[in-house]
């Protein structure tokens, strides 16, 4: 039988956790034949609530769920994990400055990076969902010197999925007909959703749309500001869709992109496309067996170049800020 996979989830008692854990436990990550061992990290005051979530997990009697462990010590929870989904983060609260947000999260992700460095399995992959995701991933990566840097990524798959959904609606096509979508840069309002290389049933998406004004004034801002639109409508930030994207991203990473397609993933820049080396920047990537490669050779026009540079610049500023705070 297939050996179990140990999956850590941080912030497990939060909104995203409430959706994510049940999907993981039901086999959405690696199918029904791979047993899942869940290792759930929370801060001490949230452990009681997490116990309630575990009661519900028990009550689902998922055949795929091998075991569940909870705790507030990352050194224990990350012990031997093959996959770590870092969802828990400190949200921005009223009156909090950007610097306060970065330092509150810095404390979380330096500690978790060190704990992963010392305790995770040799094959660990780490996906960061908690915001600011790219920079949190950079902090964790920098604080885990013994883990290969390509094992860290930040989530832009939700943006990628949002972009596919918007494009499908605009063109009356099925989401499954859309390939080669790209999100460049930061998981923030400066991200650049790019359909100039995307395809719909094998035809160039931008040509099928044939409407530059829709791309600039509708599509890009709708995707980039979707998170805010959901908060406005729902009174809470996107959670089920974020959980779903977190699973999509991990599954793609571990099992591979389909032939003729790619995914968006924020990974350490090697300087491709002129993106400053070392930033955690979302690129089009192909994956296989837990490894990723940045898709090379895409033609970038002036419009795209400006947007890719703007989102890189924001990440440079975030990196400078956490460097100044001594977090990396
Ligand atoms: P939430 O506030 O409902 O849950 C976060 C949980 O993390 C809380 O239960 C909290 O106790 C826990 N937590 C805080 N510090 C922790 C620590 N040091 N160790 C372990 N757990 C800790 O938030 P929600 O809605 O679940 O979102 C989680 C994060 O995901 C937020 O940062 C949010 O901005 C981000 N997000 C990212 C998206 C993306 O596409 N990258 C999309 C949507 C949300």
Image (cartoon, rainbow, N blue to C red):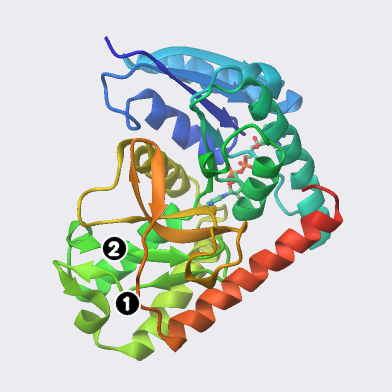
Looking at the rendering, the quadrant in which ligand 1 lies is top right
Q: Residue at x 34, y 46 (%)?
A: 287
14 on left or right of 250: right
Q: Which one is in front, 10 or 53?
A: 10
Q: How many marks?
A: 2
- Taking the image as drawn, is residue 241 in sight? yes
Q: Judge: label 1 CB < 8 Å from ligand 1.
A: no
Do labels 2 and 1 touch, CB within 8 Å? no
Q: Residue at x 79, y 61 (%)?
A: 321
292 on left or right of 110: left
Q: Residue 102's x, y, as percent?
A: 77, 53
Q: Residue 283's x, y, as percent?
A: 45, 61
Q: Which residue is label 2 attached to?
A: 180
Q: Residue at x 42, y 53 (%)?
A: 157
Q: Residue 188's x, y, as percent?
A: 58, 64
Q: Which residue is label 1 attached to?
A: 196
Please state, as top left, top right, bottom left or bottom right, where the N terminus lies in the image.
Answer: top left
| Quadrant hosting residue 42 | top right
- Taking the image as drawn, is residue 89 in sight? no
State the mark number for residue 277: none
Q: Judge: label 2 CB < 8 Å from ligand 1.
A: no
Q: Residue 23's x, y, as percent?
A: 38, 31
Tell me if residue 243 comes above or below residue 32 in the rendering.
Answer: below
Badge 2 marks a residue whose secondary structure is: loop
Q: Which one is in front, 233 or 289?
A: 289
**Mark 1 Cα-neighbour bin, 10 Å: few <14, some 14–19, many ≥20:** some
């Amino acid at each position: 039988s297939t050996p179990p996979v140990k999956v850590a989830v941080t912030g497990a008692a939060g909104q995203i956790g409430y959706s994510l854990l049940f999907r993981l436990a039901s086999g959405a990550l690696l199918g029904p034949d791979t047993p899942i061992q869940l290792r759930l990290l929370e801060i001490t005051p949230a452990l009681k609530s997490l116990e309630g979530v575990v009661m519900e997990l028990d009550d689902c009697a998922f055949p795929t769920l091998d075991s569940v462990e909870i705790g507030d010590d990352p050194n224990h929870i990350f012990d031997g994990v093959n996959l770590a989904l870092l969802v828990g983060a400190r949200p921005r609260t009223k009156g909090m400055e950007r610097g306060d947000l970065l330092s509150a999260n810095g404390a979380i992700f330096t500690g978790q990076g060190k704990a992963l460095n010392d305790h995770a399995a040799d094959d660990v992959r780490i996906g960061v969902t908690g915001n600011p995701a790219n920079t949190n991933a950079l902090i964790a990566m920098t604080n885990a010197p013994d883990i290969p840097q390509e094992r860290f990524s930040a989530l832009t798959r939700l943006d990628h999925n949002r972009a596919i959904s918007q494009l499908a609606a605009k063109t009356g096509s099925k989401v499954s007909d859309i390939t080669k979508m790209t999100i460049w840069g930061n998981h923030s309002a400066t991200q650049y959703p790019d359909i100039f290389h995307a395809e719909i049933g094998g035809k160039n998406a931008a040509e099928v749309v044939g409407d530059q004004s829709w791309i600039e004034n509708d599509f890009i801002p709708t995707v980039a500001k979707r998170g805010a639109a959901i908060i406005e409508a729902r009174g809470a930030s996107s959670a089920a869709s974020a959980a779903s994207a977190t699973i999509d991203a991990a599954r793609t990473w571990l099992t591979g992109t389909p032939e003729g397609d790619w995914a968006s993933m924020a990974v350490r820049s090697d300087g491709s496309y002129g993106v400053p080396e070392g930033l955690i920047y979302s690129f089009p990537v192909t994956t296989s067996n837990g490894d990723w490669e940045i898709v090379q050779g895409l033609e970038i026009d002036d419009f795209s170049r400006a947007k890719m540079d703007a989102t890189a610049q924001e990440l440079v500023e975030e990196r400078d800020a956490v460097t100044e705070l001594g977090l990396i």
